[in-house]
Amino acid sequence: MTIYPVPTAVTDARIQLAVDQEAKAPPATIDSDIVEVAEVQAQAEREQLLDLKV
């Protein structure tokens, strides 16, 4: 397993999710935050793999 620094976009998405959860945002907002975290994380992993292949 490759370990790499967590990009700021991933951290920002996770923070937004935590803020919305703490504020008891509507479920749709929390769901979209979860999707955003997953998408940003997947993108960061793809970029890291591309860097390793080069």
Image (spheres, rainbow, N blue to C red):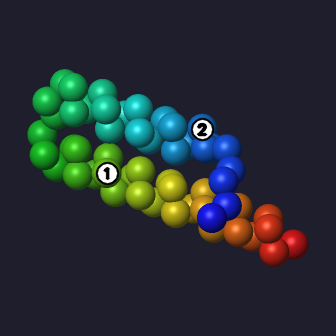
Name, please, the residue furthest toward the front: 1
Residue 34 locus on image (x, y percent): 31, 51
In primary-sequence order, the first of circles 1 and 2 is: 2
- Name the kind of residue labelled 2 in the image: Thr
Residue at 30%, 27% (x, y): give it: 19
Residue 51 locus on image (x, y percent): 79, 65
Residue at 70%, 69% (x, y): give it: 49
Q: Where does the N terminus fall, quadrant-wise?
A: bottom right
Q: Which residue is mark 1?
A: 34
* 16, above or below 54, in the image: above
Residue at 44%, 41% (x, y): give it: 13
Q: Where does the C terminus fall, quadrant-wise?
A: bottom right
Q: CA distance from mark 1 to mark 2?
A: 16 Å
Q: Secondary structure at mark 2?
A: helix
Name, please, the residue furthest toward the right: 54
* 15, above or below 10, in the image: above
Residue 30 locus on image (x, y percent): 22, 44
Position of 8 with respect to 25 (left or right) is right
Residue 18 bears which disc, if any?
none
- Name the kind of residue labelled 1 in the image: Ile
Residue 10 locus on image (x, y percent): 52, 44
> Residue 47's image quarter?
bottom right
Position of 12 with respect to 15 (left or right) is right
Residue at 62%, 44% (x, y): give it: 7
> Residue 22's image quarter?
top left
Q: Which residue is mark 2?
A: 8
Q: Secondary structure at mark 1?
A: helix
Callout 2 crowding tier (Cα within 10 Å): few <14, some 14–19, many ≥20: few
Callout 1 crowding tier (Cα within 10 Å): few <14, some 14–19, many ≥20: some
